Amino acid sequence: MNSSRRDFLKTASVIAAGSVLPVDLLAEARKRKAGPNDKIQIGLIGVRSQGYSNLASFMKNPEVECVALCDIDKNLLASRTADIEKLGFAAPKHYSDYRKMLDDKDIDIVIIGTPDHWHCLQFVHAQEAGKHVYVEKPMGNSIAEINIMRNAARKHGKMVQVGQWQRSQPHFVDAINYLRSGKLGRIRTCKAWSYVDWKGAVPKVADEPVPAGIDYESWLGPAPLRPFNMNRFHFTWRWYWEYGNGLMTDWGVHLIDYILYGMGKSIPSSVMAIGGKYAFPEDDMVTPDTMTAVYDFNDFTMIWEHTIGIGLGNWRRPHGMSYIGENGTLVLDRQGWEVVPEKQKIEAVPVQKNVGNGLDLHTRNFLDCLKNNTPEKLNASLDIGRNVALVAQMGNIAYRTGEKVSWNDATQSFATETANALITPVYHNGYKLPAY
């Protein structure tokens, strides 16, 4: 990085949090507000879905420039480059090997938007290369990996924002402020849920040749070597333990995070879980389509529920959280929040609707913290991402072992060997778990 850009990152004035420019004004805004050497340069690893959504959000800010895209699918690289050019930006460089992209000294921020089983390696290597990182949730795909990521970030000292963008959504913050007013009285039970009728069965399909333009071995990375199967590729990879952890980490880390935040907790004393493939027992998914986990925090319980194929969840909301107090219940989701009194003990609060774009506010928060060297102001810091990923993993491990599991944070282990056996993944194909 040249001295001008280094000084820019340290001293540039703050753009007010949440000020997001329309895409059609970006080119002119960039000419006015940022010179050619005063850009925060971004490289994206994993360009298909949420990774590109994250990049597009960053690029709404006039000081940001995308200089590199990395993906194992050449077809996606071409289509995303066309998307970027349509917005009036120069075409970024292409990489199929993220390690080569990390060698680019001018890249300031790396966005990691790959499947979960790749997060740890790419995160650690980005830290070692001196890059700041925006990593998609869940932070990692196992307890060992999230701890390694935390240790690597502490050693290398680069700034990290986890993609739990609800932490930047104003109405979520307003709901927590009400919760902490004490009006609900003592909270004894909290619930978080995801009911997704827009996801259905994953019918079994035969293995097939690797499609043209895809480096499938690189996609697998540290996961077990197996023939190409479309079910285990784009999007639906998340229903197989080798690559993801099902709805618990797909939606759960967003929703459970706000229970932890609102209640001021991080680690439960124990977890029990039940469920299975009740909706689609013969389909190709491995992770449960129906699951309930009960967390004991000693002074309150948290219940997680998820279903695939049913959309009518608690309080007639397909997803959400509720804080059930002795005076009333606060119900919160991405559309808004409300308070329902218990026997008229408090005043009802009608639905307070969502205002603003949480993802745009989240990426703006990261840029502001980077430019002003204020990591303490990150809305979804490394530790926030690590804590909720740990809690979600605890629920899945309770389900997979059929045990009531208890976590010892001092020893970073469970009370039983069957649960401990699921802490650390086995890496394959010559890849090694980083040593941190």
Image (cartoon, grey):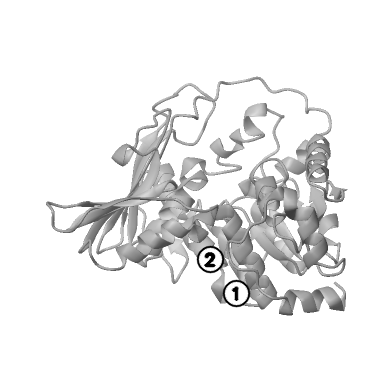
Residue at the image position 46 percent from the left and 59 percent from the top: 170
Q: Is residue 233 visible?
A: yes
**How far across and down, in percent of the image, does residue 420 sit?**
47, 55
Q: Is residue 432 visible?
A: no
Residue at the image position 73 percent from the left and 76 percent from the top: 12
Question: Residue 375, which numbered label?
Answer: 1
Residue at the image position 59 percent from the left and 33 percent from the top: 236
Question: Residue 254, which numbered label?
Answer: none
Instruction: Give the quarter of the image for residue 123.
Output: bottom right
Give the CA separation, mark 1 to mark 2: 9 Å
Q: Give the camera-side residue of 105 and 392.
A: 105
Q: Give the camera-side residue of 207 and 348.
A: 348
Q: Is residue 158 left or right of residue 72?
A: left
Q: Which residue is identified by label 2?
A: 379
**How far across and down, in percent of the image, does residue 351 sit?**
33, 49
Q: What kind of residue is marked 2?
A: Asn
Does the CB distance between marks 1 and 2 fall below 8 Å? no
Instruction: Give the quarter of the image for residue 263.
Output: bottom left
Q: Secondary structure at mark 2?
A: loop
**How far across and down, in percent of the image, does residue 414 sit?**
42, 59
**How far across and down, in percent of the image, does residue 432 sit?**
71, 56
Q: Is residue 106 left or right of residue 128?
A: right
Q: Is residue 178 left or right of residue 171?
A: left
The quadrant the N terminus occupies is bottom right
Instruction: Give the quarter of the image for residue 67.
Output: bottom right
Q: Give the camera-side residue of 108 and 365.
A: 365
Q: What kind of residue is marked 1?
A: Pro
